[in-house]
Image (spheres, rainbow, N blue to C red):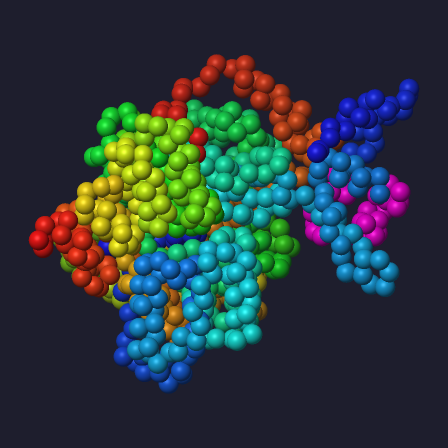
């Protein structure tokens, strides 16, 4: 396993094998009948559904009840309210994906103060410390995802061209890492490429921000968007403009997989393994509840997905067959 | 909007009367530091603690508010009459950029004027790279961080944590780059940062900043005494006594890595005998000879072995790697035991990437310290691993930056102008930099927003 990035506090990543559950762990958890709440940024994305599926399945194996699943709709205020509501319900643990940095840090710290174990997904707000405020952060190697995207997009970029980078305006560990890594790779391996930066604060802004980027830089040859849902909005803009602009993004959602199989506009996808991340998060939760030592940061490597390996990657990541349109586009069915 | 009160005072001055700047500055410095120390406070508390009369306090607070240095917009809790106005440092007005330069990683962050870290990023970077490459990457990351954390008064200072003693570092900002590492001879990092960002630069050793970070944001919070041990290629100690970092005469305290130690018939410095270079060397040997099955497998698959790999293998139960780390921990423990008996700390915090990865060094240090210390010294002693990781260096650098910005000796010369960027000595330094021949261009110049 190669992990390129460092954790939110500069930690070296631990592999998910570090939190493998032994039969005695499952037996101990079953005897305690824990209750766990899950707080996610959204429940609308393929990524969130897969992550939740991994979490719920493993917790079920350990007779641990998932008592609440909360969709914060990317809103820091909604998340603060949800976490404060959970204080009253007092689950044994909360698995949370902090949707922002400073705005939600104190609400997460209040859980720890109330004795509720906290496991973080994807993001650790500045000031929260492993061991004090939360047990473990489980995430993809987001820095590695940015590197995969840059390396995969590079062959589609002519010498001396401009590349758009559509980032996320929120101060969010995962997307910050992807953005920094993408730029770092381009600056060191493709110094001829100029990166043109734009950022969206809400997913609905992805399309207008792409239009703005194109208005200022009409000759863009490539575009990296920091995850797939806003990338689809950006792709619609590019297709309307009828410009041959190669795209790269993170996460192999169904629509993105179709675009990749058809050869446009997506050239490469840096895919996370959300189901396995969910499994690791649930295993970590059980070990934390059993007061076992868990690493500060567990990271899973990303997968480079191109048209050539889209079918096998889809099956590997989503644990289900690739869509018919993908199979058709790559010629596996008539 | 902040006003420059030197001009106001100059216009209002009558013949023979001293300038407001001359009379007000000392009390403004005192009041601002009382506010920082007790944030938030009230006018009543400030009158009590400052020994200044109500009218003078009121006048000085008005001046500080006009300068944009304090905020009185919030009300406190009423205790009978009207709720008192809370007086706070206007911490969000300005920003301090912070960075940690470690042997194998680079960390950057942005803090507010109270020294609170707002955001951080860490990435792998070999400090053996050419200094120019380090400067380019650092400037790129700092620029990106600052763009995302804009503030009304902009950037007020840059505080760096570096892997070595900073000779003669006192309160003043730096006007040249100290040769912290042999490769830094002739390196103009401080000058480049000042030219690029237009703000004063401070520098402290990573042991100093990490100790400060642990003291103010980690296991040392609220404690009067602490011993902080950083384990890496070099092994250093940070000493906290009476709630303050002890820096000695030259800022060269805690250089325990230079002490001689013995292991069987071998002897050498603690750095050489117990640092990460030893762990790596012994780990490679264990891989090549097959004594470590875990590392031998990694080597067979063509993987590089790092000291972190050795530590991770030890944590996963590899006997040869456990032995290597136990040896390191015992040697460190012997030296730490001597310090512990000398200083009688409340807590010993072990830190560094190797420490984050495993518990074996921690266990060996505990065994050595408890076995070699006076019972009174160890009665309530806690020996723990830092939970802050590399964040300790950034949190500490932020704290150092905030303290030096508002250090009375520095503050008195800029407070009437409302910004440290207008400090006369700093303004002169910038002017001299502008007059000097331009430095070699950084290549390629990153576009705005690019990282």
Q: Indicate the quadrant where residue A113 lies.
A: bottom right
Q: Nearer the viewer, residue B96 or B67?
A: B67
Residue A201: say if magenta: no
The x and y percentages for residue A2 are 25, 51
Residue shown at 70% from the left, 39% from the top: B69
Residue shown at 28% from the left, 32% from the top: A243
Residue shown at 44% from the left, 30% from the top: B448
Q: Indicate the quadrant where residue A216 lies.
A: top left
Q: Nearer the viewer, residue B404 or A196?
A: A196
What range is drawn magenta here? B28-57
Q: Residue furthest bottom?
A: A31
Give the quadrant of the N terminus of chain A: bottom left
Left or right of B118, for residue A185: left
In this view of the protein, can residue A91 be seen by the observer? yes
Residue B44: say if magenta: yes
Q: Nearer the viewer, residue A255 or B159?
A: A255
């Amino acid at each position: 396993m190669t992990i390129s990035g460092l954790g939110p506090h500069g930690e070296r990543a631990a592999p998910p094998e570090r939190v493998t559950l032994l039969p005695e762990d499952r037996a101990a958890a079953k005897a305690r009948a824990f209750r766990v709440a899950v707080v996610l940024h959204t429940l609308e994305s393929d990524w969130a559904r897969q992550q939740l599926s991994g979490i719920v399945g493993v917790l079920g194996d350990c007779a641990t009840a998932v008592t609440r699943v909360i969709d914060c709709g990317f809103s820091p205020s909604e998340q603060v309210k949800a976490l404060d509501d959970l204080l009253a319900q007092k689950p044994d643990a909360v698995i949370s994906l902090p949707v922002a940095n400073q705005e939600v840090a104190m609400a997460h710290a209040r859980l720890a103060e109330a004795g509720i174990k906290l496991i973080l997904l994807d993001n650790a707000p500045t000031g929260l410390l492993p061991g004090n405020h939360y047990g473990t952060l489980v995430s993809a190697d987001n820095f590695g995802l940015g590197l995969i995207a840059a390396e995969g997009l590079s062959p589609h970029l002519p010498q001396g061209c401009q590349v758009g980078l559509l980032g996320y305006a929120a101060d969010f560990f995962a997307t910050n890492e992807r953005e920094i890594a993408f730029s770092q790779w381009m600056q060191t391996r493709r110094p001829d490429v100029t990166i043109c930066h734009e950022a969206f604060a809400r997913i609905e802004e992805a399309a207008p921000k792409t239009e703005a980027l194109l208005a200022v830089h009409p000759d863009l040859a490539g575009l990296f968007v920091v995850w797939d849902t806003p990338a689809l909005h950006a792709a619609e803009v590019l297709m309307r403009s009828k410009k041959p602009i190669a795209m790269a993004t993170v996460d192999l959602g169904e629509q993105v997989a179709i675009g990749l199989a058809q050869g446009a506009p997506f050239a490469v996808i840096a895919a996370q393994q959300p189901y396995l991340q969910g499994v690791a998060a649930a295993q970590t939760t059980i070990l934390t509840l059993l007061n076992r030592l868990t690493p500060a940061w567990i990271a899973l490597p990303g997968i480079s997905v191109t048209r050539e390996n889209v079918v096998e990657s889809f099956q590997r990541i989503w644990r289900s067959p690739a869509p018919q349109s993908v199979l058709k586009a790559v010629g596996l069915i008539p | 909007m902040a006003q420059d009160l030197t001009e106001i005072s100059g216009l209002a001055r009558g013949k023979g009367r001293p300038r407001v700047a001359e009379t007000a500055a000392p009390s403004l410095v005192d009041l601002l530091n009382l506010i920082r120390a007790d944030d938030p406070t009230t006018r009543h508390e400030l009158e009590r603690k400052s020994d200044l009369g109500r009218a003078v306090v009121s006048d000085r607070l008005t001046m500080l508010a006009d300068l944009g240095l304090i905020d009185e917009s919030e009300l406190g809790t009423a205790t009978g009459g009207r709720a008192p106005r809370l007086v706070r440092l206007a911490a969000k007005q300005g920003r301090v950029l912070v960075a940690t330069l470690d042997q194998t990683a680079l960390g950057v962050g942005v803090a507010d004027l109270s020294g609170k870290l707002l955001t951080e990023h860490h990435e792998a970077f070999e400090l053996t790279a050419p200094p120019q490459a380090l400067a380019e990457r650092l400037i790129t990351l700092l620029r990106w961080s600052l763009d995302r954390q804009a503030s009304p008064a902009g950037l007020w200072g840059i505080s760096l944590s570096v892997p070595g003693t900073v000779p003669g570092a006192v309160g003043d900002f730096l006007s040249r780059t100290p040769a912290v590492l042999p490769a830094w001879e002739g390196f103009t990092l401080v000058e480049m940062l000042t030219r690029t960002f237009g703000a004063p630069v401070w520098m402290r050793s990573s042991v100093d900043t990490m100790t400060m970070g642990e003291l103010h944001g980690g296991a040392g919070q609220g404690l009067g005494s602490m011993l902080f041990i950083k384990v890496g290629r070099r092994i250093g100690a940070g000493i906290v006594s009476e709630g303050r970092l002890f820096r000695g005469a030259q800022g060269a305290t805690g250089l325990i890595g230079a002490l001689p130690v013995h292991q069987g018939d071998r002897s050498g410095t603690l750095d050489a005998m117990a640092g990460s270079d030893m762990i790596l060397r012994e780990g490679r040997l264990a891989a090549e000879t097959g004594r470590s099955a875990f590392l031998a497998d990694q080597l067979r698959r063509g993987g590089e072995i790092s000291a972190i790999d050795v530590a991770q293998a030890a944590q996963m139960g590899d006997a040869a790697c456990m032995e290597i780390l136990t040896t390191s921990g015992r040697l460190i423990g012997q030296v730490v035991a001597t310090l512990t008996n000398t200083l009688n700390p409340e807590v010993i915090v072990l830190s560094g990437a190797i420490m984050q990865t495993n518990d074996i060094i921690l266990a060996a240090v505990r065994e050595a310290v408890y076995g070699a210390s006076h019972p009174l010294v160890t009665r309530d002693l806690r020996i723990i691993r830092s939970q802050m990781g590399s964040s300790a260096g950034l949190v500490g650098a932020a704290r150092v930056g905030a303290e030096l910005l508002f250090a009375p000796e520095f503050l008195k010369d800029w407070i009437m102008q409302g910004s440290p960027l207008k400090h006369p000595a700093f303004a002169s330094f910038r002017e001299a930099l502008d007059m000097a021949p331009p430095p070699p261009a950084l290549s390629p110049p990153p576009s705005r927003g690019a990282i």
